[in-house]
C-alpha cells in the first residue's frame, strides 16, 4: 500500500438525465451518445419507446419486460462484451420501482415468514449496490435516464403544519445522483440544467433543446489526460465452483441465480399474458403435469410449495394461471421433448436453479416456511 502522484486520466462518461414524462430524456440521451461516438446500445424499459427514434439515430436496442437489477447488470455486461462504446439505460427508475425491481423484491421478501422491512433491506441493498458497481466499473460510456416526480415535505410554522412542494426528485434510491459524473435535470419545456458535476466546464451549464454543441465540451473534458485504463468488475453473480462454470460455458447464462430466476419466470408469464387472457385458468391435466415436473426438479412437494409461492404467490397448482403454465413450460424445456418430459440436461439445470432459490429462503428463515398447512 502506497500513495502515488495523482495524474489526470481519460474517463468514461457517467451521465444521468432526470425529468418528467415528455421532457425529452431519451432523445437527449441519444444525442449525447452520438456525440460520444462509436456504437450505441440502448436498454429499453419504456415499452419500445426508443424505437420511435430509430430513423434519427443509429443504435441497437435490448428491451426488458421485467426489471430486476440483476437483469440490468447482465444487459450491461452483454453490451460491454459486444464492444459497444456507449450504453444507454432508459430508464433506470424501473430497476427501483418497476416490476421485479428493488422495491418489488423487498415487498416480496416482507411477505415471507421471518422477514420485516429491516431484514428485507439487508437482502435488497447488496442487490442494488451490485448494479451501481456494475454501472460505475463498466468500460463504456454510460447514460441513464430517470423519471422524476414532484417531492413534498411538511413544514411547521407558528404551530401550523402545511405541505409544500420542494421540487422534482428522481425515482431511484436516495443518493443515486452522487454516483454520476454529470447529473442533469430536464423539464417539460425540454430545457436542461446541470445540478451536479465533477467537470468544472459543465458547472451551471443549461440549454433549451440541448443539441450536440451542449455536449461537446464535456466530451473534450472526458478525453483529456493520459490514455484510458480499463477497469475490472468487482461483483459477479457467477459462482467459482467447477459445476457452475462448466454449465455457464455450455448453457449460456445458466444456471440462474434466485433473483434472475424469479425475473425470468415472471418475464415469461407476462409475455404470454400479453398475448392471451392473462387470467385464464389451467385444467387438471396441466396442473398435474407441472406439479409432477416441479416435484422432480425441487426434490419434494414441500420445496415445490416454497418455490411456486415465492415466484407466483401460490402453492397449489390448482391456482396456476395459463400464462404461468406456459412460463414453466418454457423454463423446464417441456415443449422441446414433445412428450412434455424434462430431459436430463434441462432437469439438472432447473434442479440447480430451483434449489438455489429454495435454499436462499431456507437460509433466511431457518426452515421450510409455511409447511404447517396441508395443500394439494
Image (tube, helix red, strand yellow):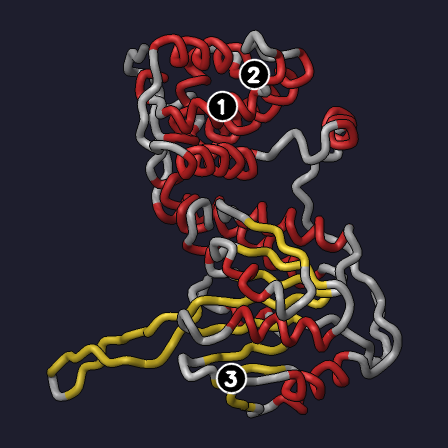
Marks 1 and 3 close (CB-CB < 8 Å):
no
Which residue ends up furthest to the right in the rendered image?
227
Residue at mark 3 = 192
Quadrant of the image containing the C terminus = top left
Tell me the element at label 1.
helix
Q: Position of residue 166 (x, y in %)?
A: 32, 81
Marker disc for residue 334 = 2
Question: Disc 1 or 2, which lies upstream in sequence?
Answer: 1
Residue drawn at point x = 47 percent, y = 25 percent: 326
Distance from disc 1 to disc 3, alpha carbons, whole Å, reads 46 Å
Tell me the element at label 2.
helix
> In this rendering, does residue 95 appear at all?
no
Marker disc for residue 50 = none
Q: Position of residue 279 (x, y in %)?
A: 31, 30
Distance from disc 2 to disc 3, alpha carbons, whole Å, reads 51 Å
> In this rendering, does residue 174 appear at all?
yes
Residue at mark 1 = 328
Amino acid at each position: 500500500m502506497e500513495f502515488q502522484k495523482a495524474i489526470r486520466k481519460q474517463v468514461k462518461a457517467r451521465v444521468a438525465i432526470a425529468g418528467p414524462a415528455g421532457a425529452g430524456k431519451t432523445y437527449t440521451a441519444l444525442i449525447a451518445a452520438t456525440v460520444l461516438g462509436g456504437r450505441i446500445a440502448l436498454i429499453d424499459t419504456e415499452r419500445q419507446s426508443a424505437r420511435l427514434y430509430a430513423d434519427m439515430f443509429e443504435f441497437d436496442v435490448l428491451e426488458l419486460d421485467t426489471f430486476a437489477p440483476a437483469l440490468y447488470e447482465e444487459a450491461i455486461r452483454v453490451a460491454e462484451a459486444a464492444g459497444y462504446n456507449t450504453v444507454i439505460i432508459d430508464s433506470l427508475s424501473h430497476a427501483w420501482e418497476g416490476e421485479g425491481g428493488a422495491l418489488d423484491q423487498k415487498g416480496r421478501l416482507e411477505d415471507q415468514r421471518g422477514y420485516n422491512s429491516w431484514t428485507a433491506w439487508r437482502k435488497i441493498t447488496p442487490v442494488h449496490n451490485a448494479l451501481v458497481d456494475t454501472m460505475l466499473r463498466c468500460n463504456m460510456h454510460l447514460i441513464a435516464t430517470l423519471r422524476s416526480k414532484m417531492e413534498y415535505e411538511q413544514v411547521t410554522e407558528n404551530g401550523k403544519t402545511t405541505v409544500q412542494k420542494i421540487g422534482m426528485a428522481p425515482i431511484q434510491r436516495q443518493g443515486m445522483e452522487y454516483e454520476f459524473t454529470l447529473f442533469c435535470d430536464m423539464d417539460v419545456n425540454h430545457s436542461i440544467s446541470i445540478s451536479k458535476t465533477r467537470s468544472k466546464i459543465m458547472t451551471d451549464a443549461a440549454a433549451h433543446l440541448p443539441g450536440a454543441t451542449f455536449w461537446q465540451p464535456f466530451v473534450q473534458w472526458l478525453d483529456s489526460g493520459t490514455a484510458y485504463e480499463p477497469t475490472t468488475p468487482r461483483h459477479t453473480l457467477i459462482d467459482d465452483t467447477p459445476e457452475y462454470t462448466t454449465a455457464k460455458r455450455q448453457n449460456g447464462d445458466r444456471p440462474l441465480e434466485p433473483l434472475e430466476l424469479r425475473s425470468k419466470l415472471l418475464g415469461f408469464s407476462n409475455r404470454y399474458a400479453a398475448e392471451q387472457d392473462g387470467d385464464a385458468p389451467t385444467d387438471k391435466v396441466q396442473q398435474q403435469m407441472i406439479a409432477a415436473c416441479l416435484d422432480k426438479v425441487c426434490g419434494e412437494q414441500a420445496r415445490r410449495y416454497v418455490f411456486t409461492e415465492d415466484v407466483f404467490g401460490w402453492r397449489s397448482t390448482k391456482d396456476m394461471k395459463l400464462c404461468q403454465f406456459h412460463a414453466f413450460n418454457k423454463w423446464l424445456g417441456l415443449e422441446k421433448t414433445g412428450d412434455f418430459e424434462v430431459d436430463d440436461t434441462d432437469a439438472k439445470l432447473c434442479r440447480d436453479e430451483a434449489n438455489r432459490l429454495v435454499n436462499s429462503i431456507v437460509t433466511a428463515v431457518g426452515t421450510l416456511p409455511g409447511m404447517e398447512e396441508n395443500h394439494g
